Amino acid sequence: MLRTRLAILLLCATLVVAHADTLPKYEMRAVWLTTNWGLDWPSAPARNAREAARQQQELREMLDALAYMGINTVFFQARIRGEVFYPSAYEPWSRIISGTAGKSPGYDPLAFVIDECHNRGMECHAWMVTIPAGNVRQAAKMGSKALPAKHPELCKKLKGNWYLDPGNPATPHYIAALVAEIVSRYDIDGIHLDYIRYPDEEGNFPDADTYRRYAPAGMSRHQWHVANISRIVTAVSDTVVALNPHVMVSTAPLGRYTSLPGLPPARWSCTEGAAQDAVAWLQQGNNDFVAPMMYYTGENYFPYLADWVARATQGYIVAGLGAYRLERTEGNWDITEIQRQIDASRHYGAAGQAFFRARHLLRFPALSLLLAGNYYRYPALVPPMSRTVESEQVPIGHSEQPLASLRLRQGILCDTLSWQPATHAARYAIYASVTDTISLDDPAFLIHTWVTDTTVTLPAGRYRTLAVTAIDSTRRESPAAIVHAPRPRKLPHTYR
């Protein structure tokens, strides 16, 4: 059945045309914002208050541009290789943010980016590089602050680089502690795990000792590796659910899940090259979504995307698109390649797109305009979480009751829309129409996706019909309350 469906979808790949006139109302439109080496941000370290203010303004301007394009989710790289961008009890401040490993930049970048994203109606997910722990030279410079120095029992060295050993039973606990630190202290919307895999050439990883010590009898080394990575994902998921079940958990696996019939062997795939059973993470509820890094073209993109979507019977797929491949030195893609890949993601039923990386969205005006004026020209809500969050009360997304007391007060300079707070509401969405009709299924009517107050001001007399829905922390939406503006009164004729 799966093979038949894949064959049909592969045939359709050549038939995917420009997007339909009706754009999706629910779609994750994400971007990876890279802090490692300051690739996206910051452009320079903050050694004093003036430089810290410059960093903050730089980030504001970047987020303004991303919001203009229609991005609604930011994966902010909060942890790189054993260094972090927030005050941590476990790992030092990154030298990239302050110029010196272990030194604060004078503010909390993670708290700052979360607030700035929310101010623009965007979710912020903490992107964490999971297994790599830096190279030997960096670790030597950091001295006692380096992860291999603090926890040598957790680390392995391979070809000049340090890695956490996934086979050590203490490794999942260590990573879960880092996650707990973020989830318990920040208003974060998601935890996003990257490099949640063994390094390249999995079979060469120097873990023969831990394999002998911890692997169950009869389990092959590869099977043990798969189990080890899955154990880390489970530990992270369990930690998040215990602390705040409304926080999404996701991963960025390799772009191809496994080799497909009729195509050359993938080799560098999740199952064959990296010990990543990302489909199981979805099916077991340990991931709300996965964003496979699909930085390929042709037969290496379309059939593998179709395969991901076909396998995702629980959770959903966000297609990771290689915006960096537009660079002349990185592939010299034409902009039409990105168009085809967005079209395909919608055609196959993926829940959205994630672009690697932020700087490349800003660097190519053609791509920015394509998103802002075309594919993302109307807002979109982030898709609801697929797993059920236990609650003492019924979440608003399952309620049949719309908001209470929706009122429109008209004024000379502005109109005021107000309503009573809804139980379990995390925020509200506003729909508006200049006529007497409105459709909540059409994002063309969606004017605000992230309102946290129960009062909004609107231009006087612009809209005839307005609707408000409540959105709970699982991203589910309530039925709408609708109000119509009274028609202008016809004044009687007067005669002199």
Image (cartoon, rainbow, N blue to C red):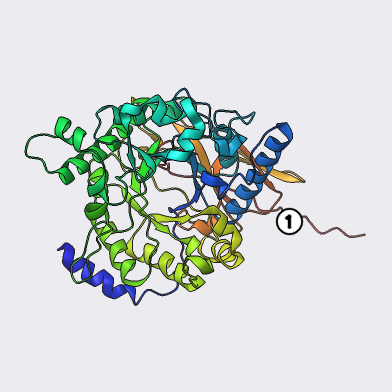
Q: What amino acid type is highlighted by mark number 1? A: Lys
Q: Residue at x 48, y 71 (%)?
A: 333
For the N terminus, the image quarter is bottom left
Judge whether 132 appears above or below 334 on screen: above
Q: Secondary structure at mark 1?
A: loop
Q: Is residue 275 visible?
A: no
| Residue nearer the viewer, 418 or 141 | 141
For the C terminus, the image quarter is bottom right
| Residue nearer the viewer, 360 or 23 | 360
Residue that mark 1 sits on: 490
Q: Residue furthest right?
A: 496
Q: Is residue 495 visible?
A: yes
Horizontal arrangement in the rendering, residue 402 relative to residue 232 (left or right)? right
Residue 451 image point, x, y percent = 56, 40
Residue 164 image point, x, y percent = 33, 35
Q: Residue at x 22, y 48 (%)?
A: 203
Judge whether 318 appears above or below 160 on screen: below
Judge whether 416 appears above or below 322 on screen: above
| Residue nearer the viewer, 118 or 366 | 366
Q: Residue at x 66, y 53 (%)?
A: 487
Residue 16 image point, x, y percent = 37, 73
